[in-house]
Amino acid sequence: MKRTDNLTAMPSNTHTGDFLPLNGTDYLELYVGNARQAAHYFQTAFGFQPLAYAGLETGLKDRESYVVVQDKIRLVLTSPLHEGGEISQHINRHGDGVRVVALWVDDATSAFTETTRRGAVLALEPTHEQDDAGYVVRSGIRSYGDTVHIFVERNDYHGVFLPGFKPWQPHYQPTPVGLRYVDHMVGNVGWNEMNTWVNFYANVMGFAQLVSFDDKDISTDYTALMSKVMSNGNGRIKFPINEPAEGKKKSQVEEYLDFYGGPGVQHIAVATDHIIDTVTALRDRGVEFLRVPDTYYEELKLRIGEIDEEIEQLRELGILVDRDDEGYLLQIFTKPVCPRPTLFFEIIQRKGARSFGKGNFKALFEAIEREQELRGTL
């Protein structure tokens, strides 16, 4: 399927001479215990639409994958068909989680060459995949933990998703909820590993650091973490990277690392143009969100200034607000969507702001701690 859209629709300053030009997020592949049920969940709860399927009926013998889509977001949900093998091992080690962060490029061979000669570890050599709808070239490199980046070159492909996939057109096609694109994706890494991966994205992939937060910015009475945000040249790909910091009790990053069995994608932030409508629809479909105390909203206007939304609506839904020099943003975070307390989603609407909600960190992390306390892991 030829892609000509701006995947993130975010303003950016293109760097001339970018050795790794990225057009946006192509797809995210999750390894899950039951791909069919996971696809049904993301359709029912999050409003994704069925797009494509690959498995026994298409000639695959080791796995099956369902692809769901909403606007510019594509999720690939993959399960093994036999015990043993890479997918089973990934699920045994991590539970359900993100394995592949695929990036849309014009030249997957060049992307592979440029990153591997700068030190990236091979995940997939440039591979030409073809069917009656054209061809795709994919290549890949390893990132933190067992996460990989796959570079996808698809300008000469007009099929439903990738060669080897067929259209998936079940009768059940629930209404979308207004999710538009991947805004950013957050990775959790181990103690003292944040700068290692900051340097990886800077030196190997040509990213620049947008902002950093230390344990004074991101801490509560009990737990702390540190974070740096890396962005590619045109601003369409943003990867905040977290590591734990010393606190009185176990931080959310430590809890993640314990249950995930190492570094990995902590949450996926997806953008909407109408967060109140989107969150209302998600809540009505059974998606559960973290809640902050009602006291958060008592002085919200004094802290944030004038906004377009009614404070009572935000309070009722639990939506948070923060402002920077360029505008404000609204955001809310789901509870973990897997059995382990690992992967969750953020719903975000930007009204000019390009930051990440620093003013909400304390209230958010206290809400996470309340969930940790219920789980007995704080």
Image (tube, grey):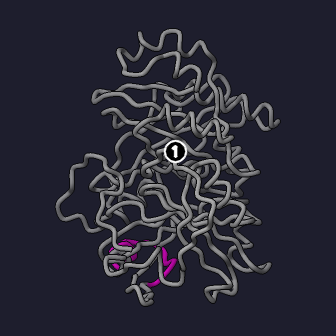
The percent coordinates of residue 47 (x first, y second) are: 56, 50
Residue name at image x 69 percent, y 87 percent? 61
In the rendered view, tell whether residue 307 sits above or below residue 254.
above
What is the quadrant of residue 83 in the picture? bottom right
Label 1 sits on a secondary structure element that is: loop
For badge 1, the amino acid type reads Val
Quadrant placement of the C terminus: top right
Q: Which of 281 and 179 is in front in this view?
A: 281
Badge 1 local density, few (<14 within 10 Å), some, or many (20+)?
Answer: many
Q: Nearer the viewer, residue 5 or 124?
A: 5
Residue name at image x 34 percent, y 32 percent? 351
Residue range in magenta is 113-125
Whether residue 230 is in magenta: the answer is: no
Residue name at image x 36 percent, y 76 percent? 153
Left or right: where 342 falls relative to 136: right
Please name the residue that numbered disc 1 is placed on: 177
Residue name at image x 47 percent, y 74 percent? 161
Q: Which residue lies furthest to the front in this view?
A: 171
Q: Which residue lies furthest to the right in this view?
A: 376
